[in-house]
Amino acid sequence: MASMTAFSATVGCYFPPPTSTSIKAPSLFRCSSSTPADGGSAFSRKREAAGGGGSREAVVAGAATQAPAAFVPSPSGDADVKSHTAWTSVRQERWEGELAVQGQIPLWLSGTYLRNGPGLWHLGDYNFRHLFDGYATLVKLHFRDGRLVFGHRQIESEAYKAATKNNKLCYREFSEVPRTDSFLSYIGDLANLLSGASLTDNANTGVVKLGDGRVVCLTETQKGSIVVDPDTLDTLGKFEYTDSLGGLIHSAHPIVTESEFLTLLPDLIRPGYLVVRMEPGTNERKVVGRVDCRGGPAPGWVHSFPVTEHYVVVPEMPLRYCAGNLLKAEPTPLYKFEWHPESSAYMHVMCKASGKIVASVEVPLFVTFHFINAYEEKDEDGRVTDVIVDCCEHQADTTILEKLRLQNLRSFTGVDVLPDARVGRFRIPLDGSPNGELDAALDPDEHGRGMDMCSINPAFLGKKYRYAYACGAERPCNFPNTLTKIDLMDKKAKNWHDEGTIPSEPFFVARPGATEEDDGVVISMVSEADGGGYAVLLDGSTFEEIARARFPYGLPYGLHGAWVPSSS
Ligand SMILES: CC(=O)/C=C/C=C(C)/C=C/C1=C(C)CCCC1(C)C
Ligand SMILES: CC(/C=C/C=O)=C\C=C\C=O
Ligand SMILES: [Fe+2]
């Protein structure tokens, strides 16, 4: 599709032609109190020339030009290698406006797609190390009557506000730790470190719509649960858990439906996990049950976990939390985690109704961030014999964590460096057998041996399903760069690819009234190499592109999204 050169001015504002380099915001659209005290000055362009990879203009909204390319040094120190837009900090704190659409947005698509992710990776001249360190950038695509309004805004976590006010890191992020002097001056004493007071609340991983309508941005620290307004993207305040379950961390990916919010609380003191459930309209989690770890000095990392109709599956991955690493100032090779192959890997199956463990099996070693789905398999008498669990599996290789370092992401030279991944399918027997199986659900070459950032039709959560949408690889690459529809029945994949771009997680939205599993659209936001970007809509069934809308400037890579349907 040809790209558009003009943008609509009906909702937001006029964009000057992309060649312009000036940014002048109409005062109407200037940020108000949310603008960091030091405004643009804390984010000087000097850093780009110095190889920072960040690109942050004066903090304005409502007016934009094509983003200037940011320069980062190549591994050899050559300053000519441009940082891909996906790994370049968001250029301004917020923007909102209507986009010109090429193609057809289905008229039934009415609501807001929200996407969250780490979008600001520097403070002044200081550059963060890891993709997961960035301050949260929340993006919306509001669809109505075939039209599209786009907006983005930084989430005003305590960590973000303190960092922008003081122009330095004040809380512990995924890999970044404040320097002792600034840390002590801001936070206080060591007790605050142990109590979790110094942990980040930077809600940069995902966003969920609770059954009661509240929209919450999340990360892996419990304090990083932040309520936002899905229309204005305003930060409304902390989501406070009113129970007394304690703990500091939880899974980044709760299972959220109209009727419940289920999550896992890893217990680092007495290695295990609490499975907890929260009813819509409340802030109180109740314990469903507890799983004790079978191996290792600590629980395995639970970035996500799967459920079936009747069971919660608790994965015990050999990539385990490490309390020692948590306290270290410098990042270790696996950050806050440690790889313990000797501890083996396990899958525990808990009955949702009783909290009882119905199976606990040893499985082959595995590494995953994201479980795709799970379901119960029955025999001819209707008895459940096995639980099937699918995930984006990194071939039991932890190097993917290192590949997500910004320096590595920014230094793609055309050499293929993305480690292989596959759709890993676990079979967990419920007959008391001690072992479960793990195999590829389809030939990984179908999707270029890249596999992550998945979604399914939410009506098939926990049920036998056929289709998954995810990012695969068109090699050579250093990061998944295709949108891929996986057919788990035919064991085939269909791939969409736009050379040089990085698309974010393909998010499936079902057509209201649909009877086929893949009747709907798939939404993704695409970052181009040189400062541009666009939203793309694919038909969920044919996987053909049906619409695209250019952004005024490209956005950094974002992680996970949610759909908030229009209320009328
Ligand atoms: C963005 C993403 O996918 C994961 C983010 C994970 C984060 C921010 C984890 C943070 C943590 C700490 C700040 C200390 C405790 C351990 C851990 C949960 C890893
Ligand atoms: C970006 C990512 C994990 C994000 C967690 O929320 C994984 C990418 C894996 C690449 O193959
Ligand atoms: Fe995730």
Image (cartoon, helix red, strand yellow):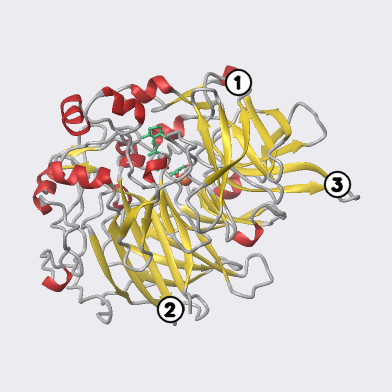
Q: Secondary structure at mark 3?
A: loop
**Residue drawn 22% across and 36% down?**
170
Task: Work out whether mark 3 precedes mark 1 in sequence or the reverse, and give the earlier one.
Answer: 1
Q: Going 40% across and 39% down the picture, which residue do you hit?
A: 221
Is residue 433 shown left or right of residue 198?
Answer: right
- Badge 3: how crowded within 10 Å, few (<14), some, or many (20+)? few
Q: Which residue in the structure is indicated by mark 3?
A: 383
Q: Earlier in the sequence, mark 1 or mark 2?
A: 2
Tag 1 residue: 295
Q: Position of residue 339 (x, y in %)?
A: 50, 23
Label 1: how many residues lie within 10 Å, few (<14), some (14-19) or many (20+)? many
Q: Secondary structure at mark 2?
A: strand
Q: Is residue 354 left or right of residue 113?
A: right
For ligand 2, give the image quadrant: top left
Whichever of labels 3 and 2 marks the residue nearer the N terminus, that label is 2
Instruction: Tell me which corner region of the image, top left, top right, bottom left or bottom right, holds residue 228.
Output: bottom left
Q: Between 410 and 294, which is closer to the camera in this rendering?
A: 294
State the separation of the CA atoms marked 1 and 2.
Answer: 51 Å
Tell me: 300 left or right of 238: right
Callout 1 amino acid: Gly
